[in-house]
Amino acid sequence: MKKTILFPVLMCIPLFGICQVKSIEELLLPAPVSLKQGSGNFILNSKTNIVILSKDIDAKRVATFLSKKLSQSAGFLVNVKTSSTAAGSNIIKLSLISDAILGNEGYKLDITSGTIMLSANKPAGLFYGMQTLVQLMPKEIESIHVVKNMAWKIPACSITDYPRFGWRGLMFDVARHFFTKDEVKKYIDEMVKYKYNLLHLHLTDDEGWRIEIKSLPKLTEVGAWNVKRVGYFGTFQPPSPDEPRTYGGFYTQDDIKEIVQYAKDRFVDILPEIDVPGHSLAAIAAYPELACSAGQGPKSEVSSGQNIKDWSTHTALIDDNLCPANENVYEFLDKVLTELAHLFPFEYIHMGGDETFKTFWEKSDAVKALMQKEGLKTMEEVQSYFEKRVEKIVESKGKKFMGWDEILEGGLAPSAAVMSWRGMKGGIEAAKMKHDVVMSPTDFAYIDYMQGDPIIEPHIYATLRLKKAYQFEPVPEGVDSKYIKGGQANLWSEQLYTFRHAEYMTWPRGFAIAEALWSPKEKRDWDNFFPRVENQFKRLDESEINYAPSAYDPIFEATNTGNKQLMIELSTEPKGLDIYYTFDNSFPDCFSPKYAEPLIVPKESVMLKVITYKGKNPVGRLIYMPIEELQKRADNKK
Ligand code: ACM
């Protein structure tokens, strides 16, 4: 990658007697478009003034965020004032300018020892420039307590920066497990630090309906509650009738208004998703007449994570789909969308469309009659009929229609935007048909997947390591980039019970996706990225935000050799780590054997224990890997 910065020594932090050297570049994530180092430092103190060279109230809000942050961690109040001029030194100036290269979200940041000049075309640019400015401050700025006796140095530099994509999203599934209004706000606080600007809320699913719809009260009276289970989602026993349905929750419309305003103040749009016609069991539990079986099939209850679908045969075991042949379904959706459109100012409404197993549609006389009447030949065409009708309802509310890539099957609705999740294929197809696309492929952007070895990670059925997430490239070859609005990482919550764990799953893979969406493509460089991730870890420690250290853990590769021995290769995603191991059941540390070449498992050994170090410091977790498990992996290799 091209490096604009070549002079490394800016901060010298005494750490166990070692002088740790950081370049400015190492402080910033996502990487900016261009960065030039200056000389010296701006020193923030209680005499610093923030001056807004504009009367814009949004610009004032950005300045106030900065001053609040300083008062929380530095413990002093800086003065914020509006003025048409600002002379003298020890000033942070915020200015709205006109510079075509910066677009709506870009900014320029010029820091000298006397002044900081932050300029942008729009307040959103000032906001992202402010995030960069905060990243340039000592990590203690992220502390949740006041830190005394700090020199609040900001290195002199000059930055010009703007995003590659306008859609930089995170999806938070608040349906499978409910997360409170305050947790959603905290998620917004965390995402904006990395310049995300879109929060997709997956508001409904088989496990819960999470938004109050005043004209359809049972959606939340019935649909928001199930029976708590912990363990492996999809394997739970169905609840018995006497088990209390007290687990869940929902957002009132006032809650939604508060979240939307909170997000807007931070330049974040909220994309609401109502997932239909599949994944609709919570709605059907509330209004059973909306299913094709119309209450005549197995009793519809909000799922508590038991198996309601046979994934191997794509068979629904319970009727969790809205019936496309029932006019009441479209009236129901009209009511939902009328209220939704008033609550969410964002231009799009996401209507789901994924994983609609057609088992009960196939059995339905009403669907058969609909097919005959409309000349529909396949179940995919039936879903397409449904999607086109829903598209019209969405548009009648003044909104644009978006869905998961299944909405391509059977014919895409004329103005639909597609969110591509089953790889990039659906996105490519839609872009070639001149439809707008958001890329969120499972292979790079599914942050509900495990991020390391299943022997240690909280269980789910697939893995996405940090290094792979960092390879996310939203614009595939041969596609006109103007149809790719951007991308997002998706955090599904089947296996997510707490907000701490949501953080663990989001960071650091959220850094990787943020960089793919903000920074120039040619800046992508794993070896340059990982030290910046490590720098952010220290800041997350200050703010007590959880993250996964999984990238430090080793990767195990087990092979049967020609002479029937079991061979183990160990590696790590980042460079510069040492791996120590034992086969004798003792705990490895940096005095244990250091991995240097493939290991042959000693006969009768039962456990390989490993840990990674960076110099004298353990960084990975102590992993117990049963030899039996390694043998199984070697035997299963083709
Ligand atoms: C999805 O992951 N089912 C969109």
Image (spheres, rainbow, N blue to C red):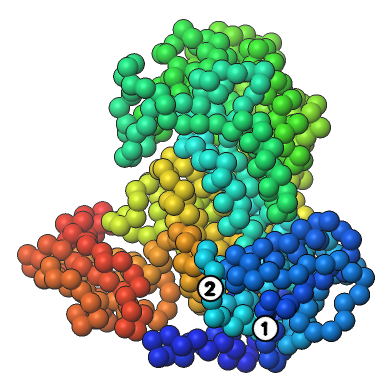
Viewer-proximal residue, 127 or 466?
Answer: 127
Q: How packed is label 2: few (under 14 Cα within 10 Å), some, or many (20 or more)?
A: some
Residue 440 in view here: no
Q: Which residue is mark 1?
A: 43
Which amino acid type is shown beneath numbered disc 1?
A: Ile
Q: Quadrant of the N terminus?
A: bottom right
Q: How packed is label 1: few (under 14 Cα within 10 Å), some, or many (20 or more)?
A: some
Q: Quadrant of the C terminus?
A: bottom left
Task: Give the image quarter of residue 334.
Answer: top right
Local SS, label 1: strand
Which callout, 1 or 2, points at the residue further toward the start of the chain? 1
Viewer-proximal residue, 382 or 574?
Answer: 574
Is residue 71 left or right of 348 when viewed as pictured?
left
Q: What is the count of numbered marks?
A: 2
Question: Residue 219, percent across and down?
Answer: 57, 21
Ligand 1 closer than 8 Å to label 2 CB: no
Q: Which residue is mark 2?
A: 147
Which amino acid type is shown beneath numbered disc 2?
A: Val
Q: Residue at x 22, y 62 (%)?
A: 624
